Amino acid sequence: MKKIFLTFLILIIPFIGNATTMLINGDGTSAAGGGYATPAHVQSNSGVGTGPVTTSGNATSGNTIVVWISGLSTLADVSLSGCNVSSWTGETQVSPTSGLVYGRWYHGITTGGACSITFTEGISDPGWSVYEISGLATSSSDQLVNGEVYFDGTWETAVATTTLANEALLCGWGDGSADPEVSYASGWGNTTLQNTHAHGTALKIVSSTGTYTCGGTDNTSGTYGGTSLITLKAAAL
């Protein structure tokens, strides 16, 4: 009888250990899982006018659509619809104390397919840029930093500190001058630019926490404008 009981304990102990490991994590991942996805640029596009805002190709389900809009009137009451996004998040707008240029970031999760986005309110002289980014959390806004800058020389007022190793940073700006010659600081890429409208964006994927600057240089003496840096967290694996 004792032999049978000991054999039963030897057989069941490994299974108890495995079950305990799964419960420790508490997030549906095994001990070998965890971590965060690496965000990646899928596609981007830009344009001028009342829209619609469109991507160059179909969007993929689960990816994040990020839109930057700039114009000569307030964007506080402007919302978006379309691109198979059920809920758009509109961040705080850039509202410079000098000059006329406003800017605002919007983002949402798409279910995929053709991507066409419309504005729900009128905007004076609007311009837009749109990104599709993979690997982001479904509720991903980390930090938004708006700053007023004079686009003549270095512009570095938008600074953010990330909280996750893997995040996507997007820099958006609008300027009151025509045809600015903008170059970005190291590490920024996937840029969009509408020279005649004087607005643009850039993307930076980071893999370590730290403090990052949205900035670069403008080689054209211009008027006051606004710049905005948004950081978006990666999805948990």
Image (cartoon, grey):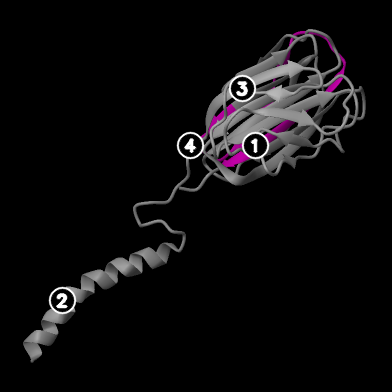
Are the residues flagged by discs 1 and 2 in contact, CB closer than 8 Å? no
Q: Quadrant of residue 45?
A: top right
Q: CA distance from mark 3 to mark 4?
A: 18 Å
Query: Could you tell which of marks 4 and 1 lies nearer the N-terminus?
Result: 4
Residue in the picture at 22% in, 74% down = 13
Amino acid at the residue labelled 3: Ser
Q: Is residue 25 visible?
A: yes
Mark 3 or mark 2, earlier in chain = 2
Foreground disc of the pair 3, 4: 3
Disc nearest the viewer among 1 and 2? 1
Marks 3 and 2, Cα distance to the nearest angstrom? Answer: 59 Å
Q: Nearer the viewer, mark 4 or mark 1?
A: 1
Question: What SS does tag 4 mark?
Answer: loop
Dividing the picture into quadrants, the one containing residue 17 is bottom left
Q: Main secondary structure of the magenta part?
A: strand
Q: Nearer the viewer, mark 3 or mark 1?
A: 1
Circle 4 sits on which residue?
A: 38
Kindly check if marks 4 and 1 are in contact, taking CB atoms under 8 A apart as contact: no
| Tag nearer the camera, 3 or 2 | 3
Q: Find disc 3 in the rendering and name its residue.
A: 44
- Mark 2 sits on what residue? 10
Q: Which mark is residue 222?
A: none
Q: CA distance from mark 4 to mark 1?
A: 23 Å
Judge from the rendering whether residue 237 lies leftward or rightward of residue 174; answer left or right.
Answer: left
The stretch of residues the image draws in magenta is: 204-233
- The quadrant of the picture occupied by the N terminus is bottom left
Query: Which secondary structure lies at badge 1?
Result: loop
Marks 3,4: beta carbons within 8 A: no
